[in-house]
């Protein structure tokens, strides 16, 4: 990568376009035995973009190559100790539940 992305959105686009978001989501899903949802890719991309923006792409790639699911999990996980602290989680949950209910699909909730 020649130039460093200037914005978090640009970082997210790089991480999605290079498959890193998909790879990290898959690694964390397998490690923690939870299903990964395509709807969560934007959230994962945003979290990884913040990390890459602060520490650089090489630092993120080192975690991926080392399969450091603990370190990656800390980057992606909610950083607050109480529920609903981050509004995007609430919006994601409402959208996800609404889609499943409209299609008559069962709800699976993991906490």
Image (tube, rainbow, N blue to C red):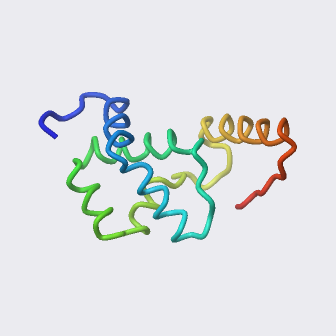
Q: Residue at x 14, y 33 (%)?
A: 3
Image x and y of residue 95, in percent: 71, 35
Reply above or below: 75 against 43. Answer: below
Question: Which quadrant does the N terminus fall into?
Answer: top left
Q: Which residue is drawn at 32% across and 62% down?
A: 64
Q: Which residue is drawn at 33% across and 47% down?
A: 51
Q: Which of 71 and 64 is in front in this view?
A: 64
Q: Nearer the viewer, residue 53 or 36?
A: 36
- Locate residue 5: give its quadrant: top left
Image x and y of residue 74, in percent: 45, 60
Image x and y of residue 50, in percent: 36, 42
Image x and y of residue 29, in percent: 54, 63
- Locate residue 53: give its quadrant: top left
Q: Which residue is drawn at 65% across and 52% down?
A: 82
Q: Nearer the viewer, residue 71 or 13?
A: 13
Q: Which residue is situated farthest in the left direction here?
A: 2
Reply above or below: 3 against 83. Answer: above
Question: Which quadrant does the C terminus fall into?
Answer: bottom right
Count of numbered tags: 0
Reply above or below: 31 against 38. Answer: below
């Amino acid at each position: 990568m020649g130039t460093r992305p200037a914005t978090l959105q640009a970082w997210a686009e790089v991480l999605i376009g290079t498959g890193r978001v998909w790879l990290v989501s898959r690694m964390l899903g397998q490690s923690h035995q939870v299903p990964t949802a395509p709807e969560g890719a934007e959230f994962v991309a945003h979290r990884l973009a913040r990390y890459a923006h602060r520490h650089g792409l090489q630092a993120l790639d080192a975690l991926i190559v080392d399969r450091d699911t603990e370190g990656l999990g800390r980057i992606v996980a909610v950083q607050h100790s109480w529920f609903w602290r981050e509004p995007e989680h609430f919006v994601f949950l409402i959208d996800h539940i609404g889609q499943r209910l409209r299609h008559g699909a069962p709800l699976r909730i993991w906490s």
